[in-house]
Amino acid sequence: MDLETFFAENKKCALAFSGGTDSVYLLYAAKSYGCDIKAYYMQSPFQPAFEFEDAKRIVKQLDIDLTVISYNILENEQVRNNSINRCYFCKRTIFEKIIMQAKADGYSVILDGTNASDNVNDRPGMKVLIELHVLSPLKICGITKTDVRRLSKEAGLFTYKKPSYACLATRIPSGHEITEADLLKIEKSEGILSEMGFQNFRIRMYRYEDGVASLETEKSQWKYAYNNMDKIEKSLSQWFDKVILENTYRDTEIIL
């Protein structure tokens, strides 16, 4: 099956929309193939402000309505307690709310942007898609992340080169209760590093010691990070006492 066939068979759909590369291309394709598509964005403390801005920007470009559902996901104790199954409880809560709103709006077919490159076995939240009968057209049609980026570039979508982005909760070690204060300082810290030129990086609360953050970045930016650690630590000092540089390619670390 290809996307044209999929949308010929599913003419009215609701999309759980993140503003990321995959869901943006899926939204574009749905409209291109004549689907009555409506986008639903879940706004919560787990999503940084720039994701919401990207979502608003692209729906304006595509001239598609965006329904924003605001919910403080930390009201869910199973999410707030941050067990190893947090992703499952979080995704279930989010999709239940999107599905409820979409059905109230007259949409019974619910989509998400999972692509054919995504490893379902590595993502506990994927179980939710099966349980709630959410369809993933990109995966169904065998469209990989590489395909999505190429097709997005051809379509003139600015998200074609947007880095993959996991929610802010992934920066906090399992078992450590998630608070809005911690999420905010991580978001602010990553914003500063982005302004410094970092790409494809994460600031995480260090798993062994309070007040310490770890900077994870791709290998190509290690030298730049190493040479600027004093500036990085000073810039983030209002939130973290110390910043360490971690190697995301091997289970080793450099403590500076």
Image: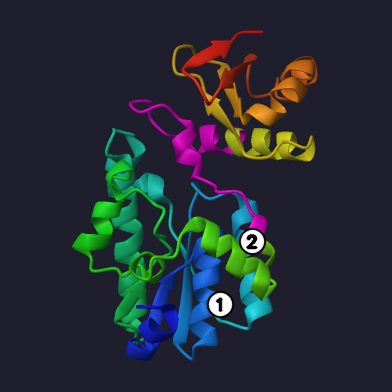
Spot the residue most to the left: 131
* 173 in the magenta segment: yes
* Residue type for callout 1: Tyr
Q: Position of residue 152 (x, y in %)?
A: 61, 68
Q: CA distance from mark 2 to mark 1?
A: 12 Å
Q: Residue at x 27, y 61 (%)?
A: 129
Label total for image: 2
Q: Residue at x 61, y 24 (%)?
A: 215
Q: Give the position of the C terminus as an image quadrant.
A: top right
Q: Secondary structure at mark 1?
A: helix
In the rendered image, is residue 19 in sight?
Answer: no
Q: Residues within 10 Å of mark 2 (few under 14, many from 20)?
A: many
Q: Is residue 129 above or below residue 30?
A: above
Quadrant housing residue 4: bottom left
Q: Residue at x 47, y 80 (%)?
A: 38
Residue matched to label 2: 160
Front in this rendered view, residue 214 or 199: 199
* Residue type for callout 2: Tyr
Quadrant housing residue 64: bottom right
Question: Which residues lie in the magenta part?
Answer: 159-185
Does 228 sit left or right of 164 as displayed?
right
Q: Position of residue 239 (x, y in %)?
A: 64, 24
Q: Position of residue 77 (x, y in %)?
A: 29, 41
Front in this rendered view, residue 76 or 98: 98
Residue matched to label 1: 28
Q: Give the position of the N terminus as an image quadrant.
A: bottom left
Q: Secondary structure at mark 2?
A: helix
* 175 in the magenta segment: yes
